[in-house]
């Protein structure tokens, strides 16, 4: 009986690890896609600001899991770049 429980516990543990890996990876990918879209839309100032903030938020959430950390860091950088480009175009339109 104890051997069956050990095998079952191991299988459940492996399944949980696999699920955690998939969730972390998908959040990193989503944050990266939002960061790219934000950077492309950043010449429209408000779109760049909103997209940049969303990309930074998703990137921070992705960094918390080891699987999505690299993509999350890239998304945070893209979010900051989108905000900066949006600010540049905003000041360019005002001046």
Image: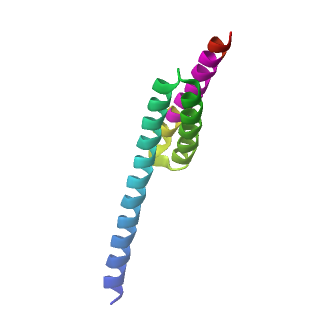
Q: Is residue 83 highlighted in magenta?
A: yes
Q: How is the image coloured?
A: rainbow
In front of the other: 35 or 4? 35
Range of residues picked out in magenta: 75-90
- x, y percent for residue 71: 46, 37
Q: Quadrant of residue 77?
A: top right
Q: Is residue 58 highlighted in magenta?
A: no
- x, y percent for residue 63: 54, 44
In this rendering, position of residue 75 left or right of residue 90: left
Residue at 32% x, 90% y is 1
Residue at 53% x, 20% y is 43
- x, y percent for residue 23: 42, 54
Quadrant where the C terminus is found in the figure: top right
In this rendering, position of residue 35 left or right of residue 2: right
Residue furthest top in the image: 95
In front of the other: 68 or 27? 27
Q: Main secondary structure of the magenta part?
A: helix
In front of the other: 82 or 66? 82
Q: Is residue 40 visible?
A: yes
In this rendering, position of residue 49 left or right of residue 21: right
Residue furthest front in the image: 94
């Amino acid at each position: 009986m104890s051997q069956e429980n050990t095998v079952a516990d191991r299988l459940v543990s492996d399944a949980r690890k696999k699920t955690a890996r998939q969730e972390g990876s998908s959040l990193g990918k989503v944050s990266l896609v939002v960061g790219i879209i934000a950077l492309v839309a950043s010449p429209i100032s408000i779109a760049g600001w909103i997209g940049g903030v969303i990309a930074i938020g998703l990137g921070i959430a992705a960094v918390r899991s080891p699987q999505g950390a690299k993509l999350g860091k890239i998304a945070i950088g893209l979010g900051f770049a989108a905000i900066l480009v949006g600010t540049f175009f905003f000041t360019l339109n005002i001046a």
